[in-house]
Image (tube, helix red, strand yellow):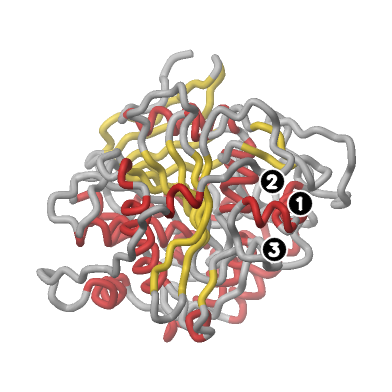
Amino acid sequence: MKPVLYSCLLFSFWLLSFLSFCEAADGQGEILHKLLMSGRSEKSRISSSRSWAAGLHGSNPATYSPVSIEPQDGKMEADEIDALPGQPDGIDFDQYAGYVTVDQKAGRALFYYFVESPRNSSSNNPLILWLNGGPGCSSLGYGAMSELGPFRVNSDGQTLFRNDFAWNNVANVIFLESPAGVGFSYSNTSSDYDNAGDTTTAIDTYTFLVNWLERFPQYKSTDFFIAGESYAGHYVPQLASTILYNNENTNQTVGNGLLDDAITLRGIYDNFWTHALNSDETYKGIHKYCDFANDTVSEKCFEFTGQADDEIGDIDIYNIYAPICLDSSLKSGSHGSVHDFDPCTDYYVENYLNIPEVQKALHANQTEWTHCRYYAWTDRPPTILPILKNIIESGVSVWIYSGDNDGRVPVAATRYSLNMLKLGVKKGWHGWYSEKEVGGYVVEYEGGLSLVTVRGAGHLVPSNQPQRALTFISSFLQGTLPPSTP
């Protein structure tokens, strides 16, 4: 069985989306930054894009490898959520949560949270699969509870408030915790955690999707999009490539992304200097001793990049002009606002998702839930650009978006990477509008790729600028560029 798929590719160029207030454990931003830096000295562990594709799709591209499909009768009804503890009144949409087994023999299952569009909205609304990165971080804790989901967690860590700009206003959204071991997802075979990597994640996510569509067959003919952030810059194009490979008649798909390690590092340090975060001396030292083009390292390069990181000081590198979390304690009696993102949100979410009644309502196994899990990560290509190029050449429309206050994976890194594709410009750089203000800037390239920036946002675009995020995702789903006039 091959699922009916799909419709365009959405990329977020946030390699790192977790705010710098995480003290108890690394978040998806810090995990990815460490992976980027370690990859420069561990070339033996990094596969090429070609070898990655061969490992995933096999040596014979004409051979289709079917996935295991488990019986799904009655599981959709069993997964429906009656209500989440502390949710506000007047909820006008249905929500579901549960597990989809992706390997019966290993006992490996992925956890999902699914929110449908409001009951009075269009029945033609598309389906979005949202993936967070890390690798090893939760789409439930970040994507659903902190960014684009229908709820945010109040500072009491016990109750929820409505996100007026949730993406389920315009689509039905699946939040998937992947790979196994992230959040509520699990495996009964402990070696699965040691062997996690790009290939196993792509296969498991594809297997999840095929089985999920059996559980929710009403979405088989729905336009489908994949979106995400952080290391999902690998997950999404690789999943899109897998979908295209396994569906002969597919001409629609989706994605997100970290595209090229070395180019991204160059963009990071150039952005530090242009935003007055680094000294002239450090900037010159990096450009003298760091050969990003050939991705070679030296002791002097590490010395100057370390100096650059030290010079920045105690700021939120993922949103350089935003406040940091100074008091992570829970606060009773306070109500959050989607218009004013609280930098301590991560603490509220972690408390909420560890309440036994919440885990029961989500049909999750009782466990200690955390935002991220560390993996050795056994395979990853250093660049996704060849995969992205193949997706574009398949006729898929691709958007890459980036918050312009992002210091960890800045717009500069995005532009450097896209320039490597050497695409002609179809519609030049111009402002786009949301609520009578410039929401950001956009350029459309030949071949169906567009770069969209979001003004005033960091890595967590839907958190920092929720209304602008809803504007551009609405345009993307409609197949048009964001509004060019107020």
- Of the numbered discs 2 and 3, the one sitting upstream in the chain is 3
The label on residue 309 is: 3
Please identify the quarter of the rendering in which residue 16 is found. Answer: bottom right
Structural distance between the alpha carbons of marks 1 and 2: 6 Å
Q: CA distance from mark 1 to mark 3?
A: 11 Å
- Residue 480's spot in the image, x, y percent? 33, 27
User: Circle 2 — which element?
Assistant: loop
Asked if 171 appears above or below 348 in the picture, the reply is above
Residue 269 makes an appearance in the image: no
In the rendering, at what x and y percent does residue 178 appear? Answer: 49, 63
Residue in the image at 46% along x and 47% along y: 77
> Around disc 2, counting alpha carbons within 10 Å, would you say few (fewer than 14), some (14 to 19), or many (20 or more)?
many
Taking depth in this image into account, of 33 and 274 the one nearest to the observer is 33
Identify the disc placed on residue 412.
Answer: none
> Label 2 belongs to which residue?
320
Question: Mark 2 is on which residue type?
Answer: Ile
Q: In the rendered image, is residue 11 in sight?
A: yes
**Is the N terminus in the top left, top right, bottom left or bottom right quadrant?**
bottom left
What type is the residue that disc 1 sits on? Ile
Q: Could you say which disc has been placed on residue 315 in the image?
A: 1
The mark that comes first in sequence, 1 or 3, is 3
| 94 up-or-down from 311: above or below | above
CA distance for labels 2 and 3:
13 Å
